Image (cartoon, helix red, strand yellow):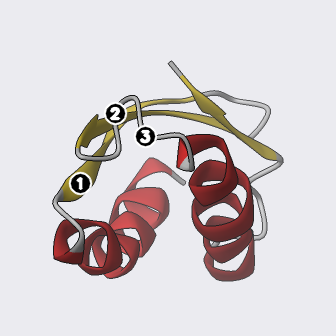
Amino acid sequence: MEEKVREALEGIRMYLQADGGDVELLEVTEDGVVRVRLVGACHGCPMAAMTLAHTIERMLKEEVPEVTAVEAA
């Protein structure tokens, strides 16, 4: 599942990079929790929580149905 998540993040990454940010994959747990770190302009951005929930988590769940949640570290 980690490889599927990495591939899905590549598709998401271009949107974040367009605004000077990026996302790093830290961990995929056995129960489907994906832990990521927002970096660049995304780190500390007031909209980071919304980006995580409404963009990254939604898109990952669409691409990799085994994903149960996405958490920022």
Which residue occupies the foreground of this view, 25 or 42?
A: 42
Q: Which residue is mark 3?
A: 45
Q: Residue furthest front?
A: 46
At label 3, which amino acid type do we have? Cys
Q: Quadrant of the N terminus?
A: bottom right
Measuring from the top left, give residue 60's x and y in whole percent: 62, 67
Q: Residue at x 28, y 72 (%)?
A: 10
What label does residue 21 carry, if any?
A: 1
Quarter occupied by residue 28: top right
Which residue occupies the foreground of this view, 25 or 40?
A: 40
Q: Residue at x 24, y 46 (%)?
A: 41
Determine contact: label 1, label 3, CB under 8 Å.
yes
Sort mark 2 into few (<14), some (14-19) or many (20+) by Cα contacts within 10 Å.
Answer: some
Q: Secondary structure at mark 3?
A: loop
Measuring from the top left, give residue 23's x and y in whole percent: 32, 48
Determine contact: label 2, label 3, CB under 8 Å.
yes
Sort mark 3 into few (<14), some (14-19) or many (20+) by Cα contacts within 10 Å.
Answer: some
Measuring from the top left, give residue 48's x and y in whole percent: 53, 44
Left or right for 56, reference 5? right
What label does residue 43 carry, if any?
A: 2
Which residue occupies the foreground of this view, 1 or 49?
A: 49
Q: Residue furthest top?
A: 73
Determine contact: label 2, label 1, CB under 8 Å.
yes
Left or right for 71, reference 4? right
Q: Earlier in the sequence, mark 2 or mark 1?
A: 1
At label 1, which amino acid type do we have? Gly
- CA–CA distance in space, label 2 to label 3: 6 Å
- CA–CA distance in space, label 2 to label 1: 7 Å
Quarter occupied by residue 3: bottom left
